[in-house]
Amino acid sequence: MVKTKVLYQCVQCGGQSSKWQGQCPHCFEWNCLEELVTSGSNNRFQALNKKSSLVRINDVEVNEILRHPTNNHELDRVLGGGLVPGGVTLIGGDPGIGKSTLLIQALASLTQNPSSALNVIYVTGEESIEQIAMRARRLDLEVSDLFAVSEINLTQIIKMIEKEKPKVVVIDSIQTLFSDELTSAPGSVSQVRECAAQLTRLAKANEISMILVGHVTKDGSIAGPRVLEHIVDTVLYFEGEANSSYRLIRSIKNRYGAVNELGIYAMTEKGLKEILNPSAIFLSATSFETSGSVITVMQEGTRPILIEIQALVDESKQASPKRLSVGLENNRMAMILAVLNKHLNLSCHHHDVFLNAVGGVKISEPGVDLAVLIAIASSLQEQPVPKKTIIFGEIGLGGEVRPVVRGQERIQEAKKLGFERFILPRKNLPKKAIEGVELLAVDDVNSALNLVFN
Ligand code: TYD
Ligand code: MG
Protein backbone atom coordinates (compact mmCIF):
# COMPACT_ATOMS: atom_id res chain seq x y z
CA MET A 1 0.00 0.00 0.00
CA VAL A 2 1.19 3.52 -0.77
CA LYS A 3 2.03 5.35 2.40
CA THR A 4 0.91 8.93 2.66
CA LYS A 5 2.82 11.12 5.03
CA VAL A 6 1.51 14.42 6.34
CA LEU A 7 4.01 17.13 7.08
CA TYR A 8 3.57 20.81 7.84
CA GLN A 9 5.51 23.44 5.98
CA CYS A 10 6.08 27.09 6.79
CA VAL A 11 4.81 29.53 4.16
CA GLN A 12 7.51 32.01 5.07
CA CYS A 13 10.72 30.02 5.35
CA GLY A 14 9.83 26.64 3.86
CA GLY A 15 10.88 24.82 7.04
CA GLN A 16 9.05 21.56 7.80
CA SER A 17 7.61 20.19 11.02
CA SER A 18 6.03 16.82 11.74
CA LYS A 19 3.08 18.34 13.61
CA TRP A 20 1.05 21.50 13.34
CA GLN A 21 2.06 24.32 15.64
CA GLY A 22 0.97 27.91 15.98
CA GLN A 23 4.52 29.12 15.54
CA CYS A 24 7.06 27.93 13.01
CA PRO A 25 9.96 26.33 14.92
CA HIS A 26 12.42 27.50 12.22
CA CYS A 27 11.67 31.17 11.64
CA PHE A 28 9.37 31.77 14.64
CA GLU A 29 6.65 33.39 12.51
CA TRP A 30 3.09 32.82 13.72
CA ASN A 31 0.25 31.08 11.88
CA CYS A 32 2.28 30.14 8.86
CA LEU A 33 2.30 26.33 8.86
CA GLU A 34 0.38 24.58 6.11
CA GLU A 35 -0.32 20.94 5.51
CA LEU A 36 2.00 19.30 3.02
CA VAL A 37 1.09 15.84 1.79
CA THR A 38 3.92 13.77 0.41
CA SER A 39 2.82 10.58 -1.21
CA GLY A 40 5.03 7.51 -1.30
CA SER A 41 4.15 6.95 -4.95
CA ASN A 42 5.60 10.29 -5.88
CA ASN A 43 7.81 9.71 -8.89
CA ARG A 44 10.35 12.04 -7.39
CA PHE A 45 11.50 9.10 -5.36
CA GLN A 46 11.41 6.56 -8.15
CA ALA A 47 14.68 7.92 -9.40
CA LEU A 48 16.27 6.41 -6.32
CA ASN A 49 15.81 2.95 -7.79
CA LYS A 50 17.88 3.81 -10.84
CA LYS A 51 21.51 2.67 -10.86
CA SER A 52 23.92 5.55 -10.43
CA SER A 53 27.45 5.45 -11.74
CA LEU A 54 30.45 7.57 -10.92
CA VAL A 55 31.84 9.76 -13.67
CA ARG A 56 35.13 11.61 -13.71
CA ILE A 57 34.24 15.30 -14.14
CA ASN A 58 36.91 15.68 -16.83
CA ASP A 59 35.20 12.99 -18.91
CA VAL A 60 31.86 14.73 -18.95
CA GLU A 61 31.03 16.09 -22.35
CA VAL A 62 30.09 19.73 -22.07
CA ASN A 63 28.22 21.48 -24.80
CA GLU A 64 27.80 25.17 -25.18
CA ILE A 65 24.48 26.24 -23.61
CA LEU A 66 21.96 26.67 -26.39
CA ARG A 67 19.77 29.73 -26.00
CA HIS A 68 16.67 31.02 -27.68
CA PRO A 69 16.88 34.81 -27.66
CA THR A 70 13.42 36.30 -27.18
CA ASN A 71 14.58 39.43 -29.03
CA ASN A 72 13.19 41.44 -26.18
CA HIS A 73 16.63 42.83 -25.34
CA GLU A 74 16.02 43.79 -21.76
CA LEU A 75 14.54 40.37 -20.96
CA ASP A 76 17.39 38.63 -22.79
CA ARG A 77 19.83 40.70 -20.78
CA VAL A 78 18.50 39.48 -17.43
CA LEU A 79 18.14 35.92 -18.71
CA GLY A 80 21.80 35.95 -19.74
CA GLY A 81 21.13 35.81 -23.49
CA GLY A 82 17.78 34.09 -23.86
CA LEU A 83 15.70 31.12 -22.81
CA VAL A 84 17.60 27.89 -22.20
CA PRO A 85 16.05 24.55 -23.26
CA GLY A 86 15.19 22.64 -20.10
CA GLY A 87 15.61 25.81 -18.03
CA VAL A 88 12.88 26.93 -15.66
CA THR A 89 12.46 30.64 -14.99
CA LEU A 90 10.32 32.15 -12.28
CA ILE A 91 9.09 35.71 -12.81
CA GLY A 92 7.78 37.28 -9.64
CA GLY A 93 6.11 40.63 -9.14
CA ASP A 94 3.14 42.46 -7.67
CA PRO A 95 -0.21 41.90 -9.35
CA GLY A 96 -0.72 44.43 -12.15
CA ILE A 97 2.96 45.28 -12.52
CA GLY A 98 3.03 43.97 -16.11
CA LYS A 99 4.19 40.35 -16.01
CA SER A 100 1.57 39.07 -18.44
CA THR A 101 2.16 42.05 -20.73
CA LEU A 102 5.90 41.42 -20.80
CA LEU A 103 5.45 37.72 -21.50
CA ILE A 104 2.96 38.11 -24.32
CA GLN A 105 5.27 40.68 -25.95
CA ALA A 106 8.33 38.45 -25.50
CA LEU A 107 6.53 35.36 -26.82
CA ALA A 108 5.24 37.25 -29.83
CA SER A 109 8.74 38.39 -30.76
CA LEU A 110 10.13 34.91 -30.04
CA THR A 111 7.69 33.23 -32.40
CA GLN A 112 8.27 35.87 -35.05
CA ASN A 113 11.99 35.35 -35.20
CA PRO A 114 12.53 32.94 -38.13
CA SER A 115 15.76 31.55 -36.69
CA SER A 116 14.08 30.52 -33.46
CA ALA A 117 10.47 30.04 -34.51
CA LEU A 118 9.45 27.67 -31.77
CA ASN A 119 6.35 25.90 -30.72
CA VAL A 120 5.12 28.07 -27.86
CA ILE A 121 2.19 27.56 -25.48
CA TYR A 122 0.81 30.16 -23.10
CA VAL A 123 -1.12 28.54 -20.24
CA THR A 124 -3.36 31.01 -18.48
CA GLY A 125 -5.09 30.35 -15.21
CA GLU A 126 -5.97 33.94 -14.45
CA GLU A 127 -7.28 35.55 -17.58
CA SER A 128 -9.55 34.16 -20.26
CA ILE A 129 -8.22 33.44 -23.73
CA GLU A 130 -10.30 36.39 -24.98
CA GLN A 131 -8.56 38.76 -22.61
CA ILE A 132 -5.19 37.59 -23.82
CA ALA A 133 -6.22 37.90 -27.45
CA MET A 134 -7.61 41.36 -26.79
CA ARG A 135 -4.38 42.49 -25.20
CA ALA A 136 -2.29 41.07 -28.06
CA ARG A 137 -4.48 42.86 -30.56
CA ARG A 138 -4.38 46.14 -28.69
CA LEU A 139 -0.59 45.95 -28.59
CA ASP A 140 -0.46 45.16 -32.33
CA LEU A 141 1.44 41.96 -31.69
CA GLU A 142 1.89 39.34 -34.38
CA VAL A 143 0.66 36.23 -32.59
CA SER A 144 -0.28 33.92 -35.45
CA ASP A 145 2.15 31.27 -34.17
CA LEU A 146 1.31 31.58 -30.51
CA PHE A 147 -1.03 29.11 -28.85
CA ALA A 148 -2.87 29.64 -25.60
CA VAL A 149 -4.93 27.47 -23.29
CA SER A 150 -6.98 28.33 -20.25
CA GLU A 151 -6.36 25.55 -17.74
CA ILE A 152 -5.55 25.20 -14.06
CA ASN A 153 -5.48 21.43 -13.61
CA LEU A 154 -1.86 20.29 -13.52
CA THR A 155 -2.59 16.79 -14.86
CA GLN A 156 -4.37 18.26 -17.88
CA ILE A 157 -1.54 20.72 -18.50
CA ILE A 158 1.08 17.98 -18.34
CA LYS A 159 -0.94 15.77 -20.68
CA MET A 160 -1.28 18.59 -23.16
CA ILE A 161 2.42 19.44 -23.03
CA GLU A 162 3.36 15.80 -23.57
CA LYS A 163 1.08 15.65 -26.58
CA GLU A 164 1.93 18.99 -28.21
CA LYS A 165 5.66 18.90 -27.42
CA PRO A 166 6.17 22.68 -27.26
CA LYS A 167 9.63 24.19 -26.88
CA VAL A 168 8.51 27.07 -24.69
CA VAL A 169 5.73 27.04 -22.08
CA VAL A 170 4.51 29.95 -19.98
CA ILE A 171 2.42 29.25 -16.87
CA ASP A 172 0.53 32.38 -15.79
CA SER A 173 0.43 31.95 -12.85
CA ILE A 174 1.81 29.09 -10.76
CA GLN A 175 -0.50 30.09 -7.88
CA THR A 176 -3.61 29.27 -9.90
CA LEU A 177 -2.61 25.67 -10.69
CA PHE A 178 -3.65 22.69 -8.65
CA SER A 179 -2.70 19.05 -8.55
CA ASP A 180 -5.43 16.46 -7.83
CA GLU A 181 -3.00 14.54 -5.66
CA LEU A 182 -3.18 17.17 -2.95
CA THR A 183 -6.16 18.30 -0.96
CA SER A 184 -5.00 21.84 -0.24
CA ALA A 185 -6.27 24.84 -2.18
CA PRO A 186 -4.53 26.35 -5.24
CA GLY A 187 -1.97 28.93 -4.16
CA SER A 188 -1.09 27.10 -0.94
CA VAL A 189 2.53 26.29 -0.38
CA SER A 190 2.18 22.59 -0.96
CA GLN A 191 0.25 23.10 -4.22
CA VAL A 192 2.64 25.71 -5.55
CA ARG A 193 5.61 23.56 -4.64
CA GLU A 194 4.17 20.35 -6.06
CA CYS A 195 3.06 21.99 -9.32
CA ALA A 196 6.40 23.73 -9.78
CA ALA A 197 8.31 20.53 -9.04
CA GLN A 198 6.32 18.47 -11.52
CA LEU A 199 6.56 21.12 -14.22
CA THR A 200 10.29 21.41 -13.63
CA ARG A 201 10.76 17.66 -14.08
CA LEU A 202 8.72 17.81 -17.27
CA ALA A 203 10.78 20.74 -18.57
CA LYS A 204 14.08 18.98 -17.86
CA ALA A 205 12.96 15.70 -19.40
CA ASN A 206 11.65 17.31 -22.59
CA GLU A 207 14.07 20.22 -23.01
CA ILE A 208 11.29 22.74 -22.64
CA SER A 209 12.02 26.32 -21.62
CA MET A 210 9.45 26.89 -18.92
CA ILE A 211 8.47 30.26 -17.51
CA LEU A 212 6.46 30.32 -14.29
CA VAL A 213 4.75 33.52 -13.24
CA GLY A 214 4.52 33.97 -9.47
CA HIS A 215 2.68 36.59 -7.46
CA VAL A 216 4.44 38.28 -4.69
CA THR A 217 3.01 38.32 -1.18
CA LYS A 218 2.77 41.57 0.72
CA ASP A 219 6.16 41.10 2.34
CA GLY A 220 7.70 41.03 -1.12
CA SER A 221 8.47 37.36 -1.62
CA ILE A 222 6.91 34.85 -3.98
CA ALA A 223 4.40 32.59 -2.16
CA GLY A 224 6.27 29.58 -0.92
CA PRO A 225 9.35 31.69 -1.51
CA ARG A 226 12.34 29.60 -0.53
CA VAL A 227 10.72 26.48 -1.87
CA LEU A 228 10.22 27.81 -5.40
CA GLU A 229 13.53 29.61 -5.62
CA HIS A 230 15.36 26.35 -4.94
CA ILE A 231 13.44 24.41 -7.54
CA VAL A 232 13.89 26.72 -10.52
CA ASP A 233 17.04 27.70 -12.44
CA THR A 234 16.41 31.41 -12.78
CA VAL A 235 14.50 33.84 -10.60
CA LEU A 236 13.53 37.23 -12.00
CA TYR A 237 11.70 39.94 -10.10
CA PHE A 238 9.62 42.53 -11.88
CA GLU A 239 9.34 45.69 -9.85
CA GLY A 240 8.35 49.32 -10.07
CA GLU A 241 6.56 52.05 -8.16
CA ALA A 242 2.83 52.45 -8.61
CA ASN A 243 3.18 56.10 -9.55
CA SER A 244 6.08 55.64 -11.94
CA SER A 245 5.82 54.22 -15.43
CA TYR A 246 9.24 52.60 -15.18
CA ARG A 247 9.45 48.87 -14.63
CA LEU A 248 12.61 47.06 -13.66
CA ILE A 249 13.30 43.39 -14.10
CA ARG A 250 16.12 41.97 -12.06
CA SER A 251 17.71 38.54 -11.96
CA ILE A 252 18.35 37.40 -8.42
CA LYS A 253 19.32 33.84 -9.26
CA ASN A 254 20.54 32.55 -12.59
CA ARG A 255 22.15 29.21 -13.25
CA TYR A 256 22.82 30.30 -16.83
CA GLY A 257 24.02 33.87 -16.46
CA ALA A 258 24.97 36.74 -14.19
CA VAL A 259 22.80 37.83 -11.29
CA ASN A 260 21.79 41.37 -10.37
CA GLU A 261 21.47 42.19 -14.04
CA LEU A 262 18.81 44.84 -14.55
CA GLY A 263 16.39 45.29 -17.44
CA ILE A 264 14.41 48.52 -17.73
CA TYR A 265 11.06 49.20 -19.37
CA ALA A 266 8.52 51.97 -19.47
CA MET A 267 4.84 50.99 -19.31
CA THR A 268 3.05 52.88 -22.06
CA GLU A 269 -0.42 52.60 -23.57
CA LYS A 270 1.24 50.40 -26.20
CA GLY A 271 2.67 47.98 -23.66
CA LEU A 272 6.19 47.78 -22.27
CA LYS A 273 8.83 49.73 -24.17
CA GLU A 274 12.44 48.71 -23.70
CA ILE A 275 14.75 51.39 -22.40
CA LEU A 276 18.10 50.52 -23.85
CA ASN A 277 19.94 53.59 -22.63
CA PRO A 278 18.57 54.24 -19.15
CA SER A 279 21.28 56.45 -17.77
CA ALA A 280 19.39 59.64 -17.28
CA ILE A 281 15.87 58.48 -16.48
CA PHE A 282 16.35 58.41 -12.73
CA LEU A 283 17.36 62.04 -12.43
CA SER A 284 14.71 64.51 -11.36
CA ALA A 285 13.93 67.36 -13.70
CA THR A 286 14.95 70.23 -11.42
CA SER A 287 17.58 72.49 -12.93
CA PHE A 288 18.39 74.46 -9.77
CA GLU A 289 20.52 73.37 -6.85
CA THR A 290 18.54 72.13 -3.86
CA SER A 291 19.89 70.95 -0.56
CA GLY A 292 19.58 67.22 0.07
CA SER A 293 19.94 66.18 -3.54
CA VAL A 294 22.96 64.22 -4.77
CA ILE A 295 23.60 62.46 -8.07
CA THR A 296 25.42 59.16 -7.95
CA VAL A 297 26.16 56.26 -10.26
CA MET A 298 24.95 52.84 -9.25
CA GLN A 299 26.15 49.71 -10.91
CA GLU A 300 23.46 47.14 -11.43
CA GLY A 301 24.86 44.03 -13.07
CA THR A 302 26.88 45.18 -16.04
CA ARG A 303 25.28 48.61 -16.40
CA PRO A 304 26.17 51.86 -14.69
CA ILE A 305 23.07 53.98 -14.15
CA LEU A 306 22.91 57.54 -12.88
CA ILE A 307 20.48 58.11 -10.08
CA GLU A 308 19.47 60.97 -7.86
CA ILE A 309 19.32 60.46 -4.10
CA GLN A 310 17.15 62.89 -2.18
CA ALA A 311 17.20 63.43 1.55
CA LEU A 312 14.96 65.57 3.70
CA VAL A 313 16.06 66.14 7.26
CA ASP A 314 13.65 68.14 9.39
CA GLU A 315 13.35 68.87 13.09
CA SER A 316 11.09 66.31 14.69
CA LYS A 317 8.16 67.15 16.91
CA GLN A 318 7.91 63.58 18.17
CA ALA A 319 9.76 61.72 20.86
CA SER A 320 10.92 59.09 18.38
CA PRO A 321 11.79 60.76 15.09
CA LYS A 322 10.64 59.29 11.79
CA ARG A 323 12.96 57.33 9.50
CA LEU A 324 11.57 56.60 6.07
CA SER A 325 13.43 55.37 3.06
CA VAL A 326 12.12 54.65 -0.43
CA GLY A 327 14.37 52.56 -2.64
CA LEU A 328 17.17 52.28 -0.09
CA GLU A 329 17.52 49.76 2.70
CA ASN A 330 16.49 50.95 6.15
CA ASN A 331 19.43 49.21 7.82
CA ARG A 332 21.86 50.92 5.49
CA MET A 333 20.29 54.29 6.34
CA ALA A 334 20.62 53.57 10.07
CA MET A 335 24.30 52.72 9.60
CA ILE A 336 24.94 55.91 7.63
CA LEU A 337 23.17 58.02 10.30
CA ALA A 338 25.41 56.41 12.93
CA VAL A 339 28.54 57.21 10.88
CA LEU A 340 27.36 60.81 10.50
CA ASN A 341 26.93 61.12 14.23
CA LYS A 342 30.06 59.31 15.33
CA HIS A 343 32.60 60.46 12.76
CA LEU A 344 31.26 63.82 11.59
CA ASN A 345 29.48 65.03 14.69
CA LEU A 346 26.31 65.54 12.69
CA SER A 347 23.51 64.17 14.79
CA CYS A 348 20.01 63.47 13.51
CA HIS A 349 18.71 62.25 16.87
CA HIS A 350 16.07 64.97 17.00
CA HIS A 351 15.31 65.02 13.28
CA ASP A 352 12.98 63.13 10.97
CA VAL A 353 14.94 61.70 8.06
CA PHE A 354 13.34 60.86 4.71
CA LEU A 355 15.30 59.29 1.88
CA ASN A 356 14.24 58.74 -1.69
CA ALA A 357 15.87 57.16 -4.73
CA VAL A 358 14.23 59.07 -7.61
CA GLY A 359 12.22 57.04 -10.13
CA GLY A 360 11.22 54.18 -7.88
CA VAL A 361 14.34 52.11 -8.39
CA LYS A 362 15.41 49.82 -5.55
CA ILE A 363 19.12 50.14 -4.85
CA SER A 364 20.80 47.03 -3.55
CA GLU A 365 24.46 47.97 -3.83
CA PRO A 366 26.61 49.79 -1.24
CA GLY A 367 28.36 52.02 -3.83
CA VAL A 368 25.76 54.72 -3.20
CA ASP A 369 26.52 55.02 0.57
CA LEU A 370 28.65 58.13 0.28
CA ALA A 371 26.02 59.87 -1.84
CA VAL A 372 23.36 59.07 0.78
CA LEU A 373 25.57 60.42 3.55
CA ILE A 374 26.29 63.65 1.67
CA ALA A 375 22.58 64.05 0.80
CA ILE A 376 21.62 63.79 4.48
CA ALA A 377 24.41 66.18 5.53
CA SER A 378 23.40 68.59 2.77
CA SER A 379 19.79 68.68 3.93
CA LEU A 380 20.72 68.91 7.60
CA GLN A 381 23.04 71.86 7.00
CA GLU A 382 20.86 73.32 4.24
CA GLN A 383 23.82 73.48 1.93
CA PRO A 384 23.24 72.32 -1.64
CA VAL A 385 25.77 70.12 -3.41
CA PRO A 386 27.28 71.97 -6.40
CA LYS A 387 25.75 71.03 -9.75
CA LYS A 388 27.49 68.60 -12.12
CA THR A 389 29.00 66.74 -9.17
CA ILE A 390 28.90 62.95 -8.91
CA ILE A 391 29.54 61.21 -5.62
CA PHE A 392 30.05 57.50 -5.11
CA GLY A 393 31.80 55.15 -2.66
CA GLU A 394 31.01 52.59 -0.01
CA ILE A 395 31.24 53.63 3.64
CA GLY A 396 32.75 51.47 6.38
CA LEU A 397 31.85 51.59 10.05
CA GLY A 398 35.11 53.39 10.81
CA GLY A 399 34.08 56.27 8.54
CA GLU A 400 36.45 55.15 5.80
CA VAL A 401 35.41 55.38 2.14
CA ARG A 402 35.91 52.08 0.37
CA PRO A 403 36.32 51.44 -3.34
CA VAL A 404 33.41 50.22 -5.44
CA VAL A 405 33.32 47.75 -8.33
CA ARG A 406 33.68 49.06 -11.89
CA GLY A 407 34.69 52.56 -10.87
CA GLN A 408 36.00 53.45 -14.36
CA GLU A 409 32.74 52.57 -16.03
CA ARG A 410 30.82 54.71 -13.58
CA ILE A 411 33.06 57.69 -14.32
CA GLN A 412 32.75 57.23 -18.08
CA GLU A 413 28.98 56.96 -17.94
CA ALA A 414 28.61 60.14 -15.87
CA LYS A 415 31.09 61.99 -18.08
CA LYS A 416 28.97 61.10 -21.12
CA LEU A 417 26.06 62.87 -19.46
CA GLY A 418 28.03 66.04 -18.81
CA PHE A 419 29.19 65.61 -15.19
CA GLU A 420 32.52 67.27 -14.53
CA ARG A 421 33.38 66.85 -10.86
CA PHE A 422 33.72 63.50 -9.14
CA ILE A 423 34.14 62.67 -5.48
CA LEU A 424 35.25 59.08 -5.35
CA PRO A 425 37.19 56.54 -3.26
CA ARG A 426 40.96 56.87 -3.65
CA LYS A 427 41.32 53.30 -4.89
CA ASN A 428 38.91 54.07 -7.75
CA LEU A 429 41.06 56.94 -9.00
CA PRO A 430 42.03 56.19 -12.63
CA LYS A 431 45.77 55.94 -13.31
CA LYS A 432 45.55 58.57 -16.03
CA ALA A 433 43.75 61.87 -15.75
CA ILE A 434 40.56 62.14 -17.78
CA GLU A 435 40.22 65.24 -19.90
CA GLY A 436 37.52 67.68 -18.87
CA VAL A 437 36.89 65.94 -15.57
CA GLU A 438 37.97 66.85 -12.06
CA LEU A 439 38.57 63.74 -9.96
CA LEU A 440 38.72 64.25 -6.22
CA ALA A 441 39.81 61.17 -4.31
CA VAL A 442 38.82 60.71 -0.66
CA ASP A 443 39.82 58.25 2.07
CA ASP A 444 37.18 58.99 4.67
CA VAL A 445 33.82 60.69 5.13
CA ASN A 446 35.39 63.72 6.72
CA SER A 447 37.49 64.64 3.71
CA ALA A 448 34.52 63.92 1.43
CA LEU A 449 32.32 66.36 3.36
CA ASN A 450 35.01 69.04 3.29
CA LEU A 451 35.57 68.65 -0.44
CA VAL A 452 31.87 68.85 -1.29
CA PHE A 453 30.99 71.89 0.72
CA ASN A 454 34.20 73.94 0.48
P1 TYD B 1 -0.46 42.88 -16.44
O1 TYD B 1 0.52 42.46 -17.47
O2 TYD B 1 -1.84 42.34 -16.56
O3 TYD B 1 0.08 42.64 -14.98
P2 TYD B 1 0.36 41.28 -14.19
O4 TYD B 1 0.30 40.17 -15.16
O5 TYD B 1 1.73 41.50 -13.61
O6 TYD B 1 -0.66 41.20 -13.12
O7 TYD B 1 -0.45 44.47 -16.50
C1 TYD B 1 -1.55 45.15 -16.19
C2 TYD B 1 -1.28 46.62 -15.99
O8 TYD B 1 -0.52 47.21 -17.01
C3 TYD B 1 -2.59 47.30 -15.96
O9 TYD B 1 -2.66 48.04 -14.76
C4 TYD B 1 -2.63 48.17 -17.15
C5 TYD B 1 -1.20 48.32 -17.56
N1 TYD B 1 -1.03 48.33 -19.01
C6 TYD B 1 -0.69 49.50 -19.65
O10 TYD B 1 -0.53 50.53 -19.03
N2 TYD B 1 -0.50 49.48 -21.01
C7 TYD B 1 -0.67 48.36 -21.74
O11 TYD B 1 -0.47 48.40 -22.98
C8 TYD B 1 -1.02 47.15 -21.07
C9 TYD B 1 -1.22 45.88 -21.82
C10 TYD B 1 -1.19 47.17 -19.71
MG1 MG C 1 -1.12 38.65 -15.22
Image (cartoon, rainbow, N blue to C red):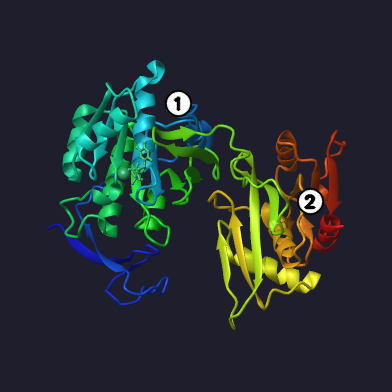
Question: Is residue 13 in view from this perspective?
Answer: yes
Q: Quadrant of the C terminus?
A: bottom right
First-in-chain label (1 vs 2) = 1
Q: Marks 1 and 2: CB-CB under 8 Å?
A: no
Mark 1 or mark 2: which is in front? 2
* Vertical side of 181 occupied by 84: above or below: above
In screen coordinates, is 174 left or right of 274? left
Q: Which mark is residue 32?
A: none
Q: Residues within 10 Å of mark 2 (few under 14, many from 20)?
A: some
* Furthest residue in direction top, as rendered: 114
Mark 2 lies within 8 Å of ligand 1 (Cβ measured): no
Callout 1 secondary element: loop
In which quadrant of the rendered view does residue 11 lie? bottom left
Near-viewer residue (60 or 162) = 162
The Cα–Cα distance between marks 1 and 2, rounded to whole angstroms, is 42 Å
Question: Which three-letter amino acid code belongs to the residue tagged 2?
Answer: Pro
Question: Is residue 254 in view from this perspective?
Answer: no
Q: Quadrant of ligand 1?
A: top left
x 39%, y 32%: residue: 270
Q: Quadrant of the N terminus?
A: bottom left
Q: Which mark is residue 71?
A: 1
Near-viewer residue (219 or 85) = 219
* Furthest residue in direction bottom, as rendered: 319
* Vertical side of 40 occupied by 147: above or below: above
x 27%, y 58%: residue: 190
x 53%, y 51%: residue: 360
Looking at the picture, how far across and down is residue 368, in whole percent? 68, 53
Looking at the picture, how far across and down is residue 165, in whole percent? 25, 28
Question: Which three-letter amino acid code belongs to the residue tagged 1?
Answer: Asn
Looking at the picture, how far across and down is residue 297, in whole percent? 68, 46
Q: Which mark is residue 386?
A: 2
Near-viewer residue (27 or 215) = 215
